[in-house]
Image: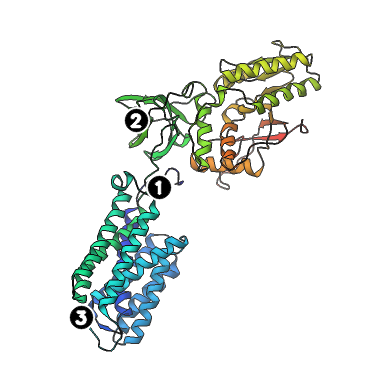
Amino acid sequence: MHSHTGVSGVDHLALALRVLLLTSTALIAGIGLLRAGATVPRWLAWAAGGMSAAVSGISAVVLDINPGFAVAHAVLALAIPVAVRWRTAAAYLGFALTLLLIAEAALGHTSLVFFLDTVFAAVAVVWFGAASATSWRDGSGLRPGPVALTAALALAGAAIGQLLLSGLFDRRLWGSAHGFVLVGAVVASLAVLVLVVVLHNPQRAFRTGAIGVLAVVVAWSVLPGIPHPPELPVPGVARLTQAAGTPVLVSPHRPGRNLVHFPDSAGLDVVVESGGRLARAVPRPGASGTWAEVDLPPGRSELLVRRGAEQGSVDVDTGTLPPLPDAAGADGPECASAALGGIVAAAASPLDRCPAASLSTEDEDALRKLVDYLASRHTPAVTVVGDDAPRSRAAADVVLSQAQQRGLPVRDDPGGALVLVAGWSRAVEVLDATNRGRGYTYGVHLAPWLLHGPVVNAVAGASLPLRFDPRDRQALSYGMDLAATFGEPPSPAGFRRWLAARGAAPGGEVTIYASAQVDVMQMANHQHDSTAGQWIPEGTIVAISDPL
């Protein structure tokens, strides 16, 4: 799953195999590596080597791992018990298996994580090997006391480093499985260090401390498979997380009426419970997925999400911010889409207003140029349709004013052009009525903010004045981020916030683009879904004018 929503669960079989593989491998590698200076029971070498080889073979069959690693692992694990009578050969084989263990555990990680994984693996190898020794050979150069102290210090440092790297310095540290395991590893490593300092007998410290080292190694082994807790909710910042096996968006995340949004993939059997009240998630005109309306109290609370047989919870914290007008009304889905644009850009910030609250200077200019474009095509008349939102009323005034300046009649005339400046919900209603009627001879023309798949696809074809090309790299990158995070079609409001997080803005000249639905013969079982990230799913959009 995407990092913004976290992984969906724990693969218990994979974790069990990983723990068995790393611990048994660390033991047999340590036996081989320290054979030059210590004596170990041969039965223990065979038991550890056999366990390591067996788990490696099972992992190759059950899990998707590299067969080459599995074969090399099994061969080295079984070779050490065979060569344990020869000190030098066993030491070389133990060193080789140690390197393989580090590669298996840390390959592909960033430099700091790789370093910590290397420390955990090396300490486990040395400690388990030393703990299994029955005696130490004089003249070998190995000094058990300094080795134990160095290993204990390295283990404690690695555990603390893992904790610092997690960034969990809040209630998630004790309120999540991930945090609990991290704390357990730190406590166990510090206990081992205290034990080494207190006990003056190195061999006793190795054997007694092996329990603590084992606990740290188990924690290190299972940590990658435990879901990292999502970020804590921030008042006023739309909440994106995972519950009941699906992404969940809570917007605007303020006290009062809020929208809880689910993608199309969540299905229609989703119910949200807030304060003992149930709200079913239902589709909304002009928007994708489903939406539930809930009332949230000030401060921290919890939403319960039920999706079929699955159930999950969502922590929310609305603080004491004032409600955001219209964030849950007819234009709420566009407001949520704007918030989602900042979230997928990893730059979530509070929404101080919804897009429908005012008409931007850029959109005003685009509408004026749209009217100029229609006048230049000798359009006989325009029909202007909006709604009660402040942006829509201001946009209608702009269109009427510009039409008057260009001498373009404004009347309800199917022989002219329709200029639609409403929000998503009202726009779909008008387009549905247009589809059932005679249509407009000079076409349907949409305000820039209506470039949204569910809206545009409500009519066979339409034109829009845009300052960006929906087919260029940046626009498609935003669409792909959105599809990967939530499965949501793009919107200009979300794209604007996505760009703002990168210090940019749609700054091109206004160009008229035409969209059209496209029916193609589907090649079943021969291609994957190619609509993810596209601005017009199952359609196309092209420029039909020069920059205006």
Res. 438 image quadrant: top right
- Residue 7 image label: 1
Between 154 and 120, the residue placed more toward the observer is 154
**C-alpha gap between disc 1 and disc 2:** 27 Å
Decide if residue 86 is in sight here: yes
- Residue 85, image x, y percentages: 28, 86
- Check the picture and name the quadrant holding the C terminus: top right
- Residue 134 image label: 3
- Residue 139, image x, y percentages: 28, 89
- Residue 19, image x, y percentages: 31, 62
- Residue 252 image label: none
Q: Is residue 526 above or below residue 144?
A: above
**C-alpha gap between disc 3 and disc 1:** 44 Å
Residue behind mark 2: 299
Q: Is residue 196 above or below residue 390?
A: below
Secondary element at image label 3: loop
Secondary element at image label 1: loop
Res. 100 image quadrant: bottom left
Left or right side of 333 for 216:
left
Decide if residue 56 is in sight here: no
Mark 1 vs mark 2: which is more N-terminal? Answer: 1
Q: Which of the two discs, 3 and 1, sits closer to the camera?
A: 3
Q: Residues within 10 Å of mark 1 (few under 14, many from 20)?
A: some
